[in-house]
């Protein structure tokens, strides 16, 4: 998962311990220029098993990410993710962003 900086939001100000994606906290994170535009973006890794609010319906689904920037600014992002059933007999699914 990447929180991309823009002209109105500096992803380096996001508190990675206060970002929730589909009900899960990030396992790890780092700042790097993901989109190669010269500013830092926040790259976060979530364990899919912890994403309890992740839709289970195969296909495109909207998922919400919420967080707080250091200080008091609340932010929220919504994007679509593609849920793809596993090819095995397991009932869980994987997510493609
Ligand atoms: Ca960037």
Image (cartoon, helix red, strand yellow):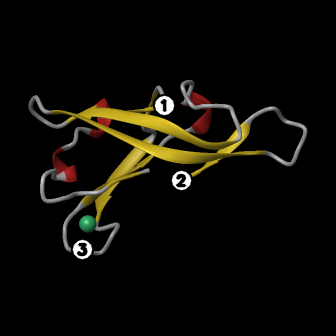
Residue at 22 percent of width and 51 percent of height = 11
Estimate the spatial distance between the alpha carbons at disc 1 and disc 2, rounded to whole Å: 13 Å
Q: Position of residue 27 (x, y in %)?
A: 46, 39
User: What SS does tag 3 mark?
Assistant: loop
User: What SS does tag 1 mark?
Assistant: loop
Residue 30 seen anywhere in this rendered image of the structure: yes
Relative side of 93 to 77, left or right = right
Sequence-first tag of 3 and 2: 3
* Label 2 beta carbon within 8 A of ligand 1: no
* Label 3 beta carbon within 8 A of ligand 1: yes
Q: Which residue is mark 2?
A: 97
Q: Position of residue 23 (x, y in %)?
A: 47, 26
State the residue lying farthest toward the right: 89
Given contact means CB atoms under 8 Å apart, are the residues at marks 3 and 1 in contact? Answer: no
Q: Position of residue 51 (x, y in %)?
A: 55, 30
Estimate the spatial distance between the alpha carbons at disc 3 and disc 1, rounded to whole Å: 28 Å
Residue 22: mark: 1
Q: Which residue is mark 3?
A: 37
Which residue is more in the foreground, 45 or 87?
A: 87
Sequence-first tag of 3 and 1: 1
């Amino acid at each position: 998962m990447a929180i991309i900086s823009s002209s109105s939001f500096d992803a380096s100000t996001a508190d990675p311990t206060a970002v929730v994606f589909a009900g899960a906290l990030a396992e790890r994170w780092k700042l790097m220029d993901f989109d190669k535009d010269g500013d830092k973006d926040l790259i976060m890794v979530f364990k899919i098993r912890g994403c309890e609010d992740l839709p289970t319906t195969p296909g495109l689904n909207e998922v919400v990410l919420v967080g707080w920037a250091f200080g008091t600014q609340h932010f929220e992002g919504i994007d679509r993710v593609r849920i793809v059933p596993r090819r095995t007999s397991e009932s869980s699914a994987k997510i493609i962003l």
